Image: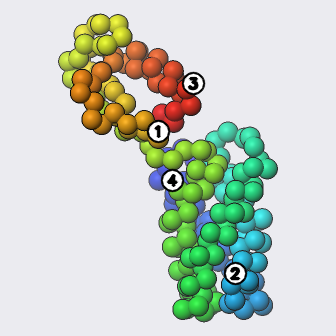
Amino acid sequence: MFEKTSEKYLLYLVRWQLSTPLLVGILFFLGTSALAVVAANLIGGLLFFWIDKKILEEKQNKVAKKYLMYLGRWQLTSLTLYPVVQLLGTGLAGIFIANLIGGLIFFWVDRWIFTGKTLPPLWEVAENIVCVDCRKKSPRGYRLVLALNYNRRKEQSPEFRCEPCSIKKTEELRKRGLQV
Ligand SMILES: [Zn+2]
C-alpha cells in the first residue's frame, strides 16, 4: 500500500500523534510515575500494533512473535516518554513532543520488527567492466560493498558483475540469508 520509506516514515510519525490523546488521557488518571508510563505504553502497544502492522509489514507472517517484540518495543518508549512527562507534565504539548521524538527514533525499530530490514545495502557501480562470472564486457557493472554481516569495503581486487549475473548473484546471497 505504501511503497517508499519516506512515505512510511511520514505516515508513521502521524500515527504516533494518534497515540497522543490516548497517553494524555491515561496519564491524566494514573499520574506521571514510572509505573503509569509503563501501563500507558502497554495499552498503547496492544492497540497500535494493528495500525503499525498495516503501515510497515510487507509479508504477513509470525504475528505472535511480532506482537511480543512490538509490546517490548513500546516499553522501550517508556525511556523517552518518562523523562519528558517529568519535565513537561502530561499535558498535550508534553506528550506531543515525546511522541515526535519517539516516532523519529522508533520508526527504525518497528520497521525491523515488521520486515526484518535493517540498513539498506550499499552497492558500487563501475563503468566498462569485465564480468567475473560470464567474462563478457559490460558498459556498467555492480558489486555489493556493504550489507548486514557482509563487508567488502577493503577488497583488494573488487569483482564486478554485469546486470544479469549481478541479479543471479544477489538471489544466491538472499538464499544464504543475507539482507540484500
Ligand atoms: Zn555476467
User: In the image, residue 64 lies at what x, y percent?
Assistant: 79, 50
The numbered mark, 4 or 1, whose residue comes first in the sequence reads 4
Count residues near mark 4 (Cα–Cα under 10 Å), then give few for <14, some for 14-19, many for 20+.
Answer: few
**Quadrant assignment, res 163:** top left
The answer as to whether callout 1 falls within 8 Å of ligand 1 is no
Callout 2: SS: helix
CA separation in Å, label 4 and label 2:
29 Å
Toward the top, the furthest residue is 135
Count residues near mark 3 (Cα–Cα under 10 Å), then give few for <14, some for 14-19, many for 20+.
Answer: few
**Which residue is label 4 attached to?**
7
Callout 4: SS: helix
Callout 1: SS: loop
* Vertical order, 2 against 85 (above or below): above
**Which residue is label 2 attached to?**
37
Q: Amino acid at mark 4?
A: Glu
**Which residue is label 3 attached to?**
175
Q: Amino acid at mark 3?
A: Lys
Label pair 1/3, CB-CB below 8 angstroms:
no
CA separation in Å, label 3 and label 2:
42 Å
**Which residue is label 1 attached to?**
149
